[in-house]
Image (cartoon, rainbow, N blue to C red):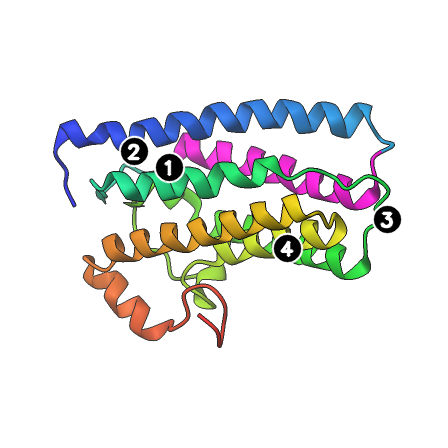
Amino acid sequence: MSKVSGARVLPLFTDLIFVILAFYFLLVYARSFFFNLQLQPSFLLYQTFFLIYQVTALALFAIRKSMVVFSSRISDYVYTLVALVSPMFFRPAVGSSGSLVGDLFVFVGAVQTVGAILSLNKSFGIGPENRGIKTNGMYRIVRHPMYSGYILVEAGFVLNNFLLFNLLIFAIASFFLVLRLQGEERLLKEDKAYQAYAQKTRWKLLPLLF
C-alpha cells in the first residue's frame, strides 16, 4: 500500500469511471422511469433504487474526506470496476410478472444500501481506500453492509427477471464483489482502529455466514 503520488492514478481513474457511469445511468434510468411507465413494477422498483443510489452517492462523493491511504494494487481496482459495472448489464425478462419475494429482496437491499452510504457519509469512496473508519449506523451489524445490500438488490432482480444471462451476471458481480471486499479488508486492517472494529464486528458481509 502506498501514498506515492504516481500511484494516485489508480483511485483517480476509478473515481472518473464511477462519475461517468453514475451520470450516464442516472440519465438512462431517469428517462426510462419517467417516459416508459409500461415497464413491469418490479423493474421500476429496481430503477427507483438506482436513481436514489446514484443521487446519494454523487452527493457524498462531492463532499467526501481526503484519503488517508489507498491501495496500490492494480488488481484491487480491477475487482472494484468489474463489481461496479457488471450489474449494469442486467436486463428485464420479457413477460415476467415479478414476485413478492423478489420485490422484498430489492426493497430491503435498497434500504440497506442507501442506509450504509448515509452511515459512511463523508468517508464514502469507490476504490480500496481509507477515508476514516466508520463503526456506527449500518456498520454495527456487518463490516460491509453496502455490499450485502447490493447482493440483496441484485438477487431480487434476478428472481423477478430470471434469465440465464442475468444469473451469470449476478454470479460475476458477486464473485468480484467479494474480491473487492477482500482488497478493502487487506488495506483497512493496517489501521489499528479497524483492527479493533473487526474484532468487535465479526461478520464481513452476511451475519452467521461470512
- Asked if the residue at tag 1 contacts the one at tag 3, i.e. Cβ–Cβ closer than 8 Å, the answer is no
The residue that disc 1 covers is 64
The residue that disc 4 covers is 155
Of labels 1 and 4, earlier in sequence is 1
> Could you say whether the residue bearing mark 2 is in a helix, strand or loop?
helix
The residue shown at (47%, 68%) is: 141
Of labels 2 and 3, earlier in sequence is 2
Q: Tell me the CA gap for discs 2 and 3.
A: 41 Å
Task: Name, please, the residue furthest toward the front.
Answer: 164
Residue 54 part of the magenta segment: yes
Of labels 1 and 2, earlier in sequence is 2
* Span of residues in magenta: 39-64
> Could you say whether the residue bearing mark 4 is in a helix, strand or loop?
helix
Query: Residue 8: image x %, image y %?
Result: 22, 30
- Asked if the residue at tag 2 contacts the one at tag 4, i.e. Cβ–Cβ closer than 8 Å, the answer is no
Is the magenta region chiefly helix, strand or loop? helix
The residue that disc 3 covers is 97
Residue 147 part of the magenta segment: no
Q: Amino acid at mark 2?
A: Pro
In the figure, is residue 11 to the left or right of 111?
left
The residue that disc 2 covers is 11
